[in-house]
Amino acid sequence: MKIIDSLLDNIIPHDNEVYNDLDWFISHSDQIGALNPYLIEKLIPFRKATYRNHYHLRTQNEALIRLLKQLEVDSDTGEVSLKSGVDENKFIEYFGNDYRNKLKRLFQKLNASGILCIQLENYESDDNHNRIQIPQTETCNCKRCLWDRFEIKKLLKAIDSTEPYHLYKEKESISETLAGEAYINYLIGRIRPAYYWLKQITERADENLSVKETLAEHNILLMKPFIESLPPSQKDDIFPEIENIDIYSTISGFSPDSLERAFLVEVIQQKLLFKTDWALDYQLNEIRDTRDIFERKGERISADHTKLLEEAFTLNYMFYHGNNLFDINQNRFRRTVKKLWEGLFLSYTIVEKYKYKLQEFSWFHLREAIRNLGPKELRELFGSFEIESFQMKEEEYASLIDCSANFFSSNHVSKETLIFSQSPVAESIFISELNSNYRFDWKVESFSQNFLFFLAYVCVPEGKEEKFRNLIDTIHDYFEIESKTTKHFTFDSLSVFLKEKVTLFSEKQIERHISILLSHPLPNGFIFWQTASRIKEVLPSFIIKDEKVWSLTKGLFQKKSGRRLALKDISPIIHLFTPQSQWWKDFYVEIEKELEKFGKEKHWDTSFIRELVDSELIEPKNQDWFQSFLAYCNEVLKKENFNSQVEITDDGCDIVSSTIPYNIAWNMAYLIRKFDLKEEDYVKYLDIPALPKILQWILSPQAFDDQVFDPRWLYFFNDRIFYSNVVIPEEQKKEVEVFLSNNFQAKLAKIYYQVIAATTK
C-alpha cells in the first residue's frame, strides 16, 4: 500500500507522480464505499495529511494542491471540469479521456469518507480552500432512498418486484446491486433473504480476492445471532455454511501492504466505531462541563463542541452506511445515536448566552433517533432533560412532516384510488409483512411511537398549521388500520401527541382520535382519563357530537365478552358529551346499577366513588348510597390495624404495608372535606374512637388530643381540600414548628405555611 513511511517523509513528489498516485487510489478504492479519513491521512496521494474538524483534510503534498487548483466543481450538477486555460493533455495521459468522471468518482469517494475540502498544511490564506464537494442527488427512488424517506409501502413493493436472488441476471462478479439488496432486506428484518443475497456475492466471486466478497462474509457473520433465532427449518441449511467462514483467513489473502487489507482490518476491528465512541464521550463531557459552568453563572470560552459531536457521529454513519455494513443496525451503533442525542439535549438546554448553544435540530438526527432508539429510551431522554418543545429550521421541519406522512400512509391504500369507501383500507403488502416478519413488526411499532413523540413536541412554524392538520388525518387513518390488524397499539404516544397538539386538532379530529382509542381491543382507562382531562383543560367548551363515539363508549362497559372496562375507566370521557343528553342519562342508569351493586356486596371501590364525585356525576348529600359507603369504610378501618400499617418518614414518604385501608381512609376523608360536611352529617355512621388516630385528626383537628399528634401527619394535608376550611389548634402548630426547627423538611414547611395562610385569612 502506498503509505507514507519514514523513508518518504522528506521526499518532495514530482507533479507527475501525484497523477499516478491518485489513479492508484481511485482503482484500489473502487470497491470501497467509504474510507476512514484517519486511514486516508496515511496514503501517499495525500502526503502525510491530517484530518481536521469540519470535514477538512490538510496535506503536505504541494503537488496535490497544484492539481486541485486546476479543477472546479459545478455546485449544481457536481460535474468536475478544468479551469479556463488549463491544458487537459496531462489529465488525459494519466486518467484517460474519461478523466472528468474519474475525478468526480475520486471526489465522491472522499466526500463519502468525510472530506469536503483539502488544504495545504501550515499555510494560512484565504485561497487555501480547495472544495471538492459533489452535491448529492435530491430525488431518487432507489430502495435505500425509499427507506430513508420512510416510504415503506413503496419500498416493500420495490423489494417484491426485484428478481429473486437465485435468478438474478447481473453478471458483475461482485455487484454493488447485490450488496444493496442484501442491506435493505436486512434493514427491514428479512434475515434469510439478506443472507442469500450476500451468498450470491460470495458465489459469483472469481479467483481474485475482492473487498465486496469479504464484506459479504463479514455481514453474514454479523447476522449469526439473528439466524440462530430462526426456526430449525429456516436455519439448518444456513448455519453450517456460516460456521465455515474464517474472516481472518480471507483477509490474510490480501497483500500485507494493500489498501484493501488495511480497510478490511478497520472494518473487522471496528476502529472507527471505537474512535467515534471515544469522541462522543469526550464532546459530551465538554458540553456537560460547559452547561455546568454557565448554570453556576460562570463563563467559558470553548470550541463548538456541539458541532464536533455531530461531525463525529456523521463520520461514523457515513462509513457504515456507505459500505452497507450490518453493524449500523446493531447495539454498538445504536449507543452512538443515544450519546449523540444526550449531547444535543445538553447543548439545547444551555443558557441562551452561550455562543454555541444548539438552537435547532436537524431532520437527519431525528431520523436516526426514530430508527435506532427504543420509544422508552426516547421518552426518558426527553424527560431527563425536561424538553417541552424543540425548534427546527423550516426546511428540516418540512422533511419531518413529509417523512411522517410517508410512514403513516404506508399501511393503507391511497384514498385517491378508492371509489366506494371513505374509510381507510388496509394495504395488503404492508399487513402481510407485519404478520410474517416480526422484526419488521417491531421496527414499525417503534417508528410509529417515535414519530408521534417528535411530532408532539416539535414547534409548528407559523403558517404551517393546515399541513399539520392534514398529517393528523393521515395518522388517524394509520391507527384506524392499526387497531384492527395488530395486538400492540401506540396508546401512550397517541395520548402524548393529542396532549401536546390538541389545539391544532379540529373538533372532528378530536372525536375521531377518541374513537380510535375506544376501538382498541385492549382499551386503557388511564389513557382515557389523560385524554379527556387535557381536552377539558385546553378546550373547555368542546363537546362530542358524534353518536359513533357514544356507541363505542357504551359498548366498552356493556360488552359481554372480551375486555370490558369498569365505569371508572369510562367516566372521564362522559364529560365530553353534551350534558343532560340521552347519553348522560344512559350513563346515569349504569352508575345507579354500579352503586346498587356496591351496596349489596358491601364492598365499595372508594377511588371510583371519589372520581365520580370529582367529576360531578354523583352527589353524596342526602343519598342512601353515601350512608352505605361510610358504613363500609368504618368497618374496614376498624378491622385493619391502620396505625401500624402506615409509617410516615421525616421527608413525607408513606411506607404502607397494605394500600387498601390507606386508600379507603384517604378517599373517605377527602369526600367528607370536599363537600364540607358537618360532623352530624357523618359521625353517626362512624365509630370515631375506633378509627385510626391520623383519620380522627384529619376529620377533627380541634377535638384531637394534642399529646398524640404527630407533625408528620400534615403531609396528608397536601391538598387544598383538606385545609381550606380547617382550623389547626395553636398547640399543634407549635409542635409542627418545633419539628421543623429540629429537622427541617421543605415539603412539610410548604404544606404548613399553606395551611396557615389558608386558615388565617
Image (cartoon, rainbow, N blue to C red):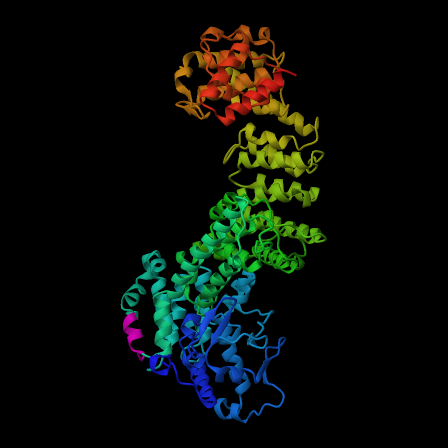
**Rendered residue at 68%/54% (across/down):** 467
User: Residue 628: image x %, image y %?
Assistant: 53, 13
Q: Is residue 463 above or below residue 237?
A: above
User: For the magenta stretch, what is the residue range?
Assistant: 248-256
User: Does residue 349 show up?
Assistant: yes
Could you say which quadrant of the image residue 272 lies in?
Answer: bottom left
Could you say which quadrant of the image residue 134 lies in?
Answer: bottom right
Q: Total of numbered circles in the picture? A: 0
Q: Is residue 238 above or below residue 342?
A: below
User: Residue 601: image x %, image y %?
Assistant: 48, 17
User: Does residue 604 show up?
Assistant: no
Quadrant that contains the C terminus? top right
Q: Is residue 451 above or below residue 15?
A: above
Quadrant that contains the N terminus? bottom left
User: Residue 681: image x %, image y %?
Assistant: 59, 8
User: Residue 463: image x %, image y %?
Assistant: 72, 53
| 42 left or right of 630 in image | left
| 206 left or right of 52 in image | left
Report if residue 466 lies within the magenta region.
Answer: no
